Amino acid sequence: MTRSVLFKSAFLLTACFTLLAMSHLAPRDWKLGVALYTFNPFSFEGQLAKADSAGLKYVEGFTFAKAGPELKDSIMMKLSPSGIARLKTILDKTGLKMESIYLVGGKTVDDWKKEFEIAKQFKVKYVTAEPPVKMWDSIDSLAGVYGMKLAIHNHWKGTSAYWHPYSTLAALKGHPNFGVCADLGHMPKSGINPVEALKKLEGRIIAIHLKDIAAYNDPKLVDVVVGTGVIDFPAVFKELERQNFNGHIIIERDRQEKPTNLQSVIETVKYYNKTLGLK
């Protein structure tokens, strides 16, 4: 047998094993959605309309969203309970499910309590946040009081206490109400391979922020459409399946495309479905 034939045979075997591995993925329990921050130039109602146009069922809110003209364009975190109730009514009419919301928080327990109250009104299942290191105990207790998990989100080195998986693990230790929202697109900015990070965070991952980036070790980069950057998403999905992950996968864009990010979200949904063999 020639070297060329051996090479071709090895290549075909590798391809077959890859397809076989992907065929065992069972993402039916994964909840694909979009972070409303992706459409942040718009009001809350406009954000929901864009998410609905992308054909998605789940959305993740954020407490610094613009409420809209009806509520004097106030940001959500400054609204009264009646204002939040109004936004909840708008959400309910769309049929979309908001099972998580990003909390900005603040420097005091009262700041965090107010935002947990917003989360409670929306009846979310978990909140996403980056709690101050000195407030881990009090915020973990608040999450327990409100009966919801707090998924620790990561940005990149120099901007976030949670840029490395080990720093996130430090926060999880002794805090039973903390979990992880792994933002895949931010990891390469700090030179971290997302697949290796997911392995380190195994068992504590509540949600994924689905995002891509063009290169490693460049914190100045802004995200690109999922599937066009350096992240190996088939390997990411395979690792999540190995861990029996069954949470939310939330598409998010930081870059604001013109006129909106809607088309890039639609492209990401198509990539997700194609990669997993769903459609």
Image (tube, grey):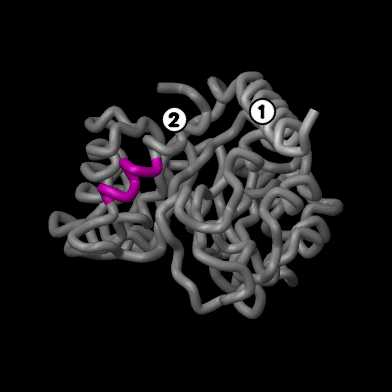
Q: Position of residue 98 (x, y in %)?
A: 41, 38
User: In terms of secondary structure, what is the magenta stretch mainly?
Assistant: helix
Q: Which mark is residue 273?
A: 2
Task: Judge by depth and name the residue closer to the eye, 279 or 20.
Answer: 20
Task: Judge by depth and name the residue closer to the eye, 236 or 249.
Answer: 236
Image point (29%, 28%), residue name = 95
Q: Which mark is residue 12?
A: 1
- Quarter holding the C terminus? top left
Image point (74%, 53%), residue name = 197
- Quarter holding the N terminus? top right
Of all residues, the one furthest to the front in this rendering is 2
What amino acid does circle 1 point to? Leu
Task: Judge by depth and name the residue closer to the eye, 73 or 193.
Answer: 193
Q: Position of residue 261 (x, y in %)?
A: 28, 54
Task: Judge by depth and name the residue closer to the eye, 59 or 261.
Answer: 261
Is residue 207 found inside the magenta-colored segment of the image? Answer: no
Q: Residues within 10 Å of mark 2 (few under 14, many from 20)?
A: few
Residue 244 visible (yes or no): no
Is residue 266 found inside the magenta-colored segment of the image? Answer: yes
Image point (55%, 70%), residue name = 106
Whether 163 is drawn above or below 178: the answer is: below
Q: Which mark is residue 197?
A: none
